Image (spheres, rainbow, N blue to C red):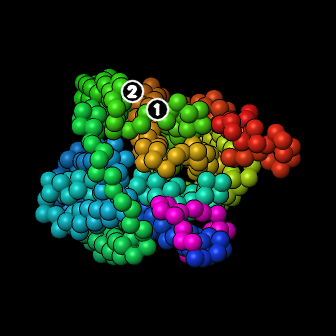
Amino acid sequence: MRSVASLAGKGGVTEESGSPGTDGSAADRATGASRRLAGVITVVVIGSIMSVLDVTIVNVALHPLAVVFDAPLVAVQWVVTGYTLALAAVIPTTAWAMSRFGAKRTYLTATALFTAGSGLAALSWNIETLVLFRIVQGLGGGLLVPVGMAMVIRAADRERMGRAMALLGIPVLIGPVSGPVLGGWLIDTVSWHWIFLVNLPVGALALVLAARLLRHDEPQPARRLDLLGLLTLSPGLALLIYGLSTGGDRGDLSTPRALLPTVAGLLLTVGFVARGLTARAPLLRLRLLRDRSFAAGWAAMVLFPAGYFGCMLLTPMYYQTARGLGAAESGVLGVPLAVAVFVSMQIATRRVDRVSPRLMILSGIVVAACGLALFAVQVGPETPYWRLVAALAVLGVGVGMVLMPALTTATRGLAAEDVPSGSTLLNIGSQVGVSMGTALLSVVLASNATRTGDGAQSAAAFAHTYWWAVALLALAAPPAALLPRWAGRPPASVPAAGAATAARRPDPG
């Protein structure tokens, strides 16, 4: 973990809880805090890699699982749907669980649940038990990312958070590239059991490191669980995501099976918002959305992932249906995009501490939209692959300039007690955004494919749908324009007399 060690050497961290001892020098305290931050990042990255890899591996295994269990694909799809719904249901409890049991205990419990669910899934004897054990996995996986993010935010210096958040972006990039390849190899050369067994050694390592490296934090048992809020938000999110996913799979959001749960989920979510604005101790602190920087970052993290991850669903389908490629070939064509995102994200997220977040993220949105527009213009039945890959690489550069920098900017100013609620709200927003984008683009593609027919005409349906994805990316620009001009403090060129005044403003721009 040279990158973590390099981050630790910067010394830009603070204590997560408690105060430093009075015996050591300032350098000793900075070194100790740096080591703690490096430990937190190491644990969180390993846990996140495990959960992200699992999702992408399982996605390529649905057809083999249908054959193994002699089950219809509709039933096997619940291996993914059950996991996603459990994820959505448990995410809202993150802030309360961290407060009630402490971040370390919550993270250990989440890791243990995910690992145990993986082991049980490998022992499944029919499709019903596999779905049940995947739900157990989802209950753990839903807590891993928001709790891990909250621990890193607490441990990192607010002015140098970009370096820490850049490392947290690594799992998001590793999973989509290596997951399908690893999943296909395990199924072809060993057996389907190993797509779940592969999580056991990683989960065991994450548990050992978490127990050794994470600091014990005192829980706050005085905080009560907002049961009414939980009973509205958790089922509301689950129903909303289920309705959108069902409508996307069927290419029609107006069917009762998609429309009814979507409407019910929206009503329950609205009820939660009304409850959250009036309760003394709400499940999540919705007042955080009154802060312009956080609200703008949250909105950008809803809209931009809707366009990006939605179009990522389309691309393998285009390669396989309109161009006749296999799954492995379409996966290889996606590697340059992932590399572009990785390189861009590492540079941009580290630089966001020292440049204008507003300018960087807006520029990233423009670059991403232009890259995807260039791809949409060229989509056809015989377009050279190098041109398509080059356009997607431009998209990747823009994506790297937006996702983690927006997350970093939104959370930079959170008070310690607001971090759990803030990370939970951001994760909920991203989950809903991805579900909405995927459902919308699936419906648009299905409706256009029906009108234009099959064969070479299918490329036209994909091209039309990609323009909708471009529009979703562009919609993230208005909230991004409300992000702060400076990353926590004005640049050195600002006169000292004005710097103190500017530093007190949430957004000098």
The residue pinned by badge 1 equals: 287
Residue 465 horizontal side relative to residue 277, left or right = right
Query: Going by the image, does 136 lie left or right of 106?
Result: left
| Residue at (65, 71) in percent of width and height | 26
Q: Verify whether residue 17 appears in magenta.
A: yes
Q: Is residue 415 above or below residue 211?
A: above
Answer whether labels 2 and 1 touch (C-beta < 8 Å).
yes
Residue 125 sits in quarter: bottom left
Q: Looking at the image, can residue 87 be seen?
A: no
Q: Give neighbour class at mark 2: few <14, some 14-19, many 20+ (Cα, 10 Å).
A: some
In the picture, which quadrant includes the N terminus?
bottom right
Compute the Cα span from label 2 to label 1: 7 Å
Q: Give the range drawn in magenta.
A: 1-22
Q: Main secondary structure of the magenta part?
A: loop
**Per the image, is 214 magenta?**
no
Residue on which the image places disc 2 = 277
Q: What residue type is labelled 1?
A: Arg
- What percent of the width, then of the height, locates residue 178? 47, 65
Query: What x and y, as percent, mark residue 173?
Result: 53, 59
- Mark 1, Cα crowd under 10 Å, few <14 / some 14-19 / many 20+, is few
* Relative image position of residue 198 (x, y in whole percent): 33, 72
Question: Residue type at mark 2?
Answer: Leu
The structure residue drawn at horizontal position 61% and vertical position 53%, both measured from the top left corner, is 158
Report the front residue among 171 and 151. 151
Q: Is residue 362 left or right of residue 130?
A: right
Q: Earlier in the sequence, mark 2 or mark 1?
A: 2
